[in-house]
Amino acid sequence: MEYHSCIISMCNVTLYVMTDLLVTWLIMTVSVLVAAYLLPGVRVASFGSALVVAVLLGVLNAILRPVLIFFTLPLTILTFGLFILVINAIIVLIVGSIVKGFEVKGFITAVLFSVILSIAHWILQAVIRYI
């Protein structure tokens, strides 16, 4: 009986983690669409493109961003952390070059996109978690 309840508990945890991951992915997708709507230099062709952009941003932020931050740490410290905006813009430009249906025109637009994306994601996540 104890073994059975442990399996059920593990299934509940797995279901919770998967649901949380799916909700976070959808929040990021909507954030991408909001940021693209607010910036004239960013174009997202479809909801599917926004889904792919959200996944790719998540993967690159998990893998590439820490490496870039490590190698540019002196510059980041020197600029009081503002160089991280440059790193975020680089990641957005990389995603823009990979995903068809997602276009970012210029470096400054990529910086603004990353800032608006972060703010939109933060607001949407706070609203969803409150509900």
Image (spheres, rainbow, N blue to C red):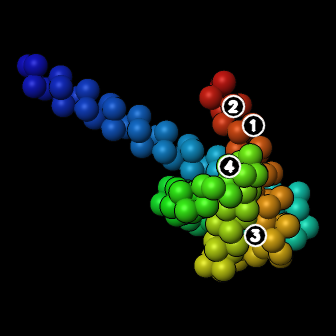
State the separation of the CA atoms marked 4 and 1.
28 Å
- Report the Cα–Cα distance between label 1 and label 2: 5 Å
Which residue, given by chain and number where applicable, does mark 2 sit on? Answer: 126
Q: Name the residue under label 1.
A: 123
Would residue 11 be found to the left or right of residue 48 on screen? left
Along the horizontal axis of the image, is 21 left or right of 112?
Answer: left
Q: Nearer the viewer, mark 4 or mark 2?
A: 4
Do labels 1 and 2 touch, CB within 8 Å?
A: yes
Q: Distance between the residues labelled 3 and 1?
A: 21 Å
- The residue positioned 13% from the left and 26% from the top of the image is 4
Along the line of sight, the residue nearer the viewer: 111 or 20: 111
Marked residue nearer the N-terminal end (3 or 1) = 3
Q: In x, y percent, where is residue 53?
A: 63, 65
Camera-side mark, 4 or 3: 4
The residue type indicated by label 3 comes to: Val
Taking 110 as reference, is 25 left or right? Answer: left
Whether residues under marks 4 and 3 lie with C-beta atoms below 8 angstroms apart, the answer is no
Circle 1: element type: helix
Label 4 or label 3, whichever comes before in sequence order: 3
Look at mark 3 in the image and give the residue it sits on. 44
Quarter that holds the C terminus: top right
Instruction: Report the Cα–Cα distance between label 2 and label 3.
Output: 24 Å
Q: Do the residues labelled 4 and 1 touch (CB within 8 Å)?
A: no
The 10 Å Cα crowd at callout 3, few under 14, some 14 to 19, many 20 or more, is many
Secondary structure at numbered mark 2: helix
Residue 24 location, x and y as percent?
A: 57, 44
Residue at mark 4: 77
Of mark 4 and mark 1, the one earlier in the sequence is 4
Residue 1 position, x and y percent, is: 8, 19
Q: In the image, which is nearer the foreground, mark 4 or mark 1?
A: 4
